[in-house]
Image (tube, rainbow, N blue to C red):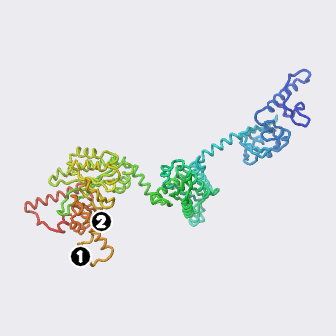
Amino acid sequence: MLCPTCARPLSDDAHRTADDSPGTGPAQPGPATAEDGDPLLAALRVSEARLRAAFWDAGIGMALIDPEDRIIEVNPAFATLTGRTVGELARTHIHEIFDPEGMPHRLFPALVHGERDRLRVEKQLKHREGRTVWSKVTVSLIRDASGGPLYTLALVEDITEQRRLGDRLEYQALHDPLTRLPNRTYFFERLDAACLTADRSTAPPDPAAGDAAEDEDDGPRVGVCYLDLDGFAAINETLGHHIGDQLLIAVATRLRRGFTAHGTQLVARMGGDEFAVLVTDSRGSDQLTDLATRILEALERPFDVAGHRLVVTASVGVVERSVQETTPTDLVKDADATLYWSKADGRARWTLYDPDRGAHQLTRQLLATALRPALERGEFTIEYQPLVGLADGAVHGAEALVRWRHPRYGTLSPDRFIPLAEESGAIVPLGKWVLEESCRQARRWLTEFPETETFVSVNLAARQIWDSDVVADVAQALERTGLPARLLQLEITESALLGPGGRPLQALQALADMGIRIAIDDFGTGYSNLAYLSRLPVHVLKLDGTFIEGFRDPSPTGSRAEMPGFGARRSDADEQIVGAMVQLAHTLGLTVTAEGIESAAQAERLRLTGCDTAQGWYFARPGEAELVAAILRDNRDGRDRQDSGDGLEGREGQDGREARG
């Protein structure tokens, strides 16, 4: 021990054994007596005994170290940590006990040289048996009387169990408990590290090198194969979740064994039946698409799970780019979007990220989010396209077509946002608004042109039938606007009308009983279940425009023998199909409307088949309600002039129809 005043060693012979090792314990201090001689020396010996007792009996390891990093003395707790005796550790260099790796390079020398007084660090101790003991080490500087550095005192606490517990908790936090694969958190940590490392390692371009050097190397790259098992939910539902879990374990094992590369490739479970393979320092999209191909091939091999041979496929989204062009969040977001493109394209395949498709998808998402607020802000408007009778050329009605006056993207047609509205459910409030506004406009036409009784035709989405009381909605719109039910026509597609369940049929029957006309839109492109037509409450069949494309030739059937080839055969076939559908509809008491009429020739040939009404750009493009009113007004004025004898002679045939169009 040292004298606390002068720092010189004190005699401790009473506490040493014959082999120069400490005895079984420190001597107990006794009271100072006159026999002790100098009272000051007696007091120092009492103080020494107390300090030695504290040093010897301390519950944590303590070591006194000289300036040459050799141990002067240790207590039994320190010796126990290393598996050695107190005597064996005397004059031992601390590097034989502490692992020198990881020792703070600046802080420890600063402490030894007296520039700081204390240092705390976690270090590994070398146990005699070869195992590692984790310890928390606090090193304090002991100064001499002049304040200079003399010795260092190390306090060592065993934290091995705490460290093991921390390691277990860290493993659990970063790994999936079912498959033992790295989880989403670990995946993002590795991805973040790859991007940060790349940022630090990317030097600014050399101006002297010019553009060629910049094109040659755009910095480190990273790629992700994001995959999802196709039809996994069906396995859970039919065989049970325990079989599904075992399948996930088998898939994870196959992916880990086949596609984990130390330092460059990481396989992780992202959640559910989604997995991802991260490739750092990738070499281009070809490497990632090749990896995706091998993943699909590996998963196509059957899995034997609990007595079941299961065959599964996967859809893979592939993204590969320079780390300078992306962030970890954007990379995974694009990979996830590409995965769902792969599913939409047919499943069991990989799809490479396409920026143009991504921009389109983003636009779709922005539009879907803005639908309901846009309705509240009044950004929607309705245009009307006349429905013209082919026999008399008069306007019988008009189809209501909603438009979105978007402040950023301009005027959007229904095909841009109606599917989004149906997916999000916004079609219900939007459909109610269109219905009521259309009925209100038809009522205005009736007020101005009571003799024509022009009807309005409104499209009805299937979700309006399923998600709302469409019968009540229609009744309310008619009551508010005062429009007679006979002047409202509702259009619904075949797929919605003939889908499963009886609710659509019940709703349509109730609407028909109110006197509302029901039209099947795009007839011939859906189920086309003719057996339903005799039992459905339907009044009108609207033929899809694809059937009208073959009517562009002005010659009637039978005079085109000089027109060989596929085009002529298709034209004949379309004409025969339309003629048959018109005849069938008339037999059932239905009227027929043709869509997409672009020329007088088409209109004439359709008239010859017996088609009742038509619409298309030949007659009028969709426009404001005043467009229909202007046509009705011209027709009325023309009739008035004829009745008064001031009008021109009525023109028959095609020329007259063109003038009215």
Q: Is residue 343 left or right of residue 518?
A: right
Which residue occupies the foreground of this view, 358 or 466?
466
Look at the image and tell me in which quarter the N terminus lies.
top right
Q: Is residue 642 left or right of residue 512?
A: left
Q: Position of residue 363 (x, y in %)?
A: 42, 55
- Identified at 33% across, 59% down, the residue is 526
Q: Which residue is mark 2?
A: 547
Residues under numbered marks 2 and 1 in contact, where contact means CB atoms less than 8 Å apart: no
- Identified at 81% across, 30% down, the residue is 53
Which residue occupies the foreground of this view, 88 or 521?
521
Q: Position of residue 632 (x, y in %)?
A: 18, 57
| SS category of the residue bearing label 1 | loop
Q: Quadrant of residue 253?
A: bottom right
Label annotation for residue 524: none
The amino acid pointed to by label 1 is Ser
Q: Is residue 320 visible?
A: no
Q: Which residue is mark 1?
A: 559
Residue placed farthest to the top in the image?
Answer: 34
Q: Tell me if residue 406 comes above or below residue 294 in the rendering.
A: above
- Identified at 23% across, 76% down, the residue is 559
Q: Position of residue 258 (x, y in %)?
A: 61, 58
Q: Tell me if residue 210 comes above or below residue 502 in the rendering.
A: below
Q: Tell me if residue 341 comes above or below residue 484 in the rendering.
A: below
The amino acid pointed to by label 2 is Phe
| SS category of the residue bearing label 2 | helix
Look at the image and tell me in which quarter the C terminus lies.
bottom left
Q: Residues within 10 Å of mark 1 (few under 14, many from 20)?
A: few
Q: Residues within 10 Å of mark 2 (few under 14, many from 20)?
A: many
Q: Is residue 5 left or right of residue 504?
A: right
